[in-house]
Amino acid sequence: MDRLSIISSALFLTADVFAVASLAMPRWIVSDIGGRTYIGLLQSCLEIYSGQQSEMCFTPVPQRTEWLLTFVCIILGILSVTSTIGLLILSHWRYRVMKHARWLGFVAIILFCLAAVIFPIGFNMEQIGGEPYQLPNNYQVGISYIFFVLALWITVVSELFASKVCLPHF
């Protein structure tokens, strides 16, 4: 296993952690109007400041199809990244699987990019009141979305290392 494969594996692992963390928290969209509102892909939470701080979480009905599809794309991307890490480790003994690892990493990039394009379509939900791809001023993206975008970019950089694109050509 060469140095670039080790770097690529570490970066893919970092991207995997960020992607899982983004799904673990329902903080994709945040608002501070009338208490704190956290909106996630599958769950929303309200934090009310009435003497005591209490948080109430619920699953909105009906589910946003766009955000459900985003969730599925991210899950499939996480599985692709995890498989890529396994294949990169296996490439230490069987170099031929490196080609499959590169393709799986590329599939993960496509899935994460699809999720990034599909997610903002759901901004027109009644609770937010925006338009597709246009979040109203009283809402902002939360830490979960930031983690997801970090996972996307780190996956791209990991793929560059796995494909050895960063090597100088003399």
Image (cartoon, rainbow, N blue to C red):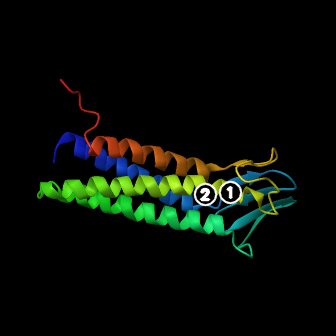
Using residue 102 as the reference point, say whether residue 14 is left or right of it. right
- The local secondary structure at tag 1 comes to helix
- Establish if 20 lies above or below 147: below
Identify the disc placed on residue 63: none
Quarter where residue 87 is shown: bottom left
The structure residue drawn at horizontal position 50% and vertical position 52%, both measured from the top left corner, is: 113
Percent from the top left, x then y, of residue 93?
11, 57
Q: Which residue is mark 1?
A: 121
Q: Viewer-proximal residue, 12 or 73?
A: 73
Q: Position of residue 26 (x, y in %)?
A: 64, 61
Residue found at x 44% / y 65%? 76
Quadrant for the C terminus, please.
Answer: top left
Task: Kindly identify which residue carries mark 2.
Answer: 118
> Residue drawn at (23%, 27%), measured in percent from left and top?
168
SS for callout 2 = helix
Kindly indicate whether the residue at mark 2 contacts the one at mark 1 (C-beta within 8 angstroms): yes
Q: Which three-letter amino acid code belongs to the residue tagged 1?
A: Ile
Q: Is residue 110 at all visible to an observer of this figure? A: yes
What's the residue at 12%, 58% (across, down)?
Answer: 94
How packed mark 1 is, by other alpha carbons closer than 10 Å (few <14, some 14-19, many 20 or more), is some
Is residue 52 rendered to the left or right of residue 150? right
Query: How many angstroms separate mark 1 from mark 2 (CA)?
Result: 6 Å
